[in-house]
Amino acid sequence: MKKELEGKFTVVTVVSQFKQRYVIPTEGLQELNQDFDLDAETAKVWAEESVMAEEVKEFSQNWLGETVIDIDVVDEDRVIELMARDNKYLVEGDDPWPREKQIKFVNNWKEERSK
C-alpha cells in the first residue's frame, strides 16, 4: 500500500433505488371530493397528490439496486465529521460515542453473510 493511503478511509456514497407501486380504487378518489365529477385526468392528479402526501398504502415494492454517486479517500477527521453529520443519534445525546468507538465501528466494516 502506498504511504499516502496509510490511516485513510475510502468513502463510497450510493443511492439505493426502489420501484414502488400504489393502487387506488377510483371510487376512493371520488370520495375525496363529492362535488366534482371525476374524470381520468383528475383521477391521475388526485392519485399522485395522495401518494406524495403519503396517504396511500404501498401495493408493491422492488429493489432496483444501488448507484454509486461519489467515492473519495479521506482522513480520520473527515470520517468523524461524516459520523456526526450522518449519525447524530450516535454522537449526541445522553450517551455519545467517543471518537475511539466511532473509529472502531468503521474498522469493523465487513458485512457478515449468512451461510
Image (spheres, rainbow, N blue to C red):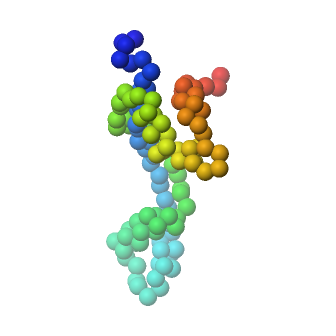
For the residue pair 90 and 25, the one nearer the viewer reads as 90
Residue 79 x, y percent position in the rendering? 45, 34
Q: Which quadrant of the structure image shows residue 39?
A: bottom left
Residue most toward the top?
1
Q: Is residue 64 above or below residue 75?
A: below
For the residue pair 101 and 38, the one nearer the viewer reads as 101
Is residue 72 visible to the viewer in this orientation of the structure?
Answer: yes
Residue at image x 34%, y 37%? 69
Q: Is residue 7 above or below residue 63?
A: above
Residue most toward the bottom?
35
Q: Which quadrant of the figure contains the N terminus?
A: top left
Residue 96 x, y percent position in the rendering? 61, 44
Residue at image x 42%, y 35%? 78
For the residue pair 28 and 20, the one nearer the viewer reads as 20
- The tally of labels here is 0
Residue at image x 41%, y 72%? 46
Looking at the image, residue 26 sits to the left or right of residue 114; the answer is: left
Q: Which quadrant of the figure contains the C terminus?
A: top right
Q: Is residue 97 above or below residue 93?
A: above
Residue 4 x, y percent position in the rendering? 35, 17
Is residue 102 visible to the viewer in this orientation of the structure?
Answer: no
Residue at image x 37%, y 70%? 45
Looking at the image, residue 42 sits to the left or right of residue 50; the answer is: left
Q: Is residue 34 above or below residue 78?
A: below
Q: Which quadrant of the structure image shows residue 65?
A: top left
Residue 26 x, y percent position in the rendering? 47, 72
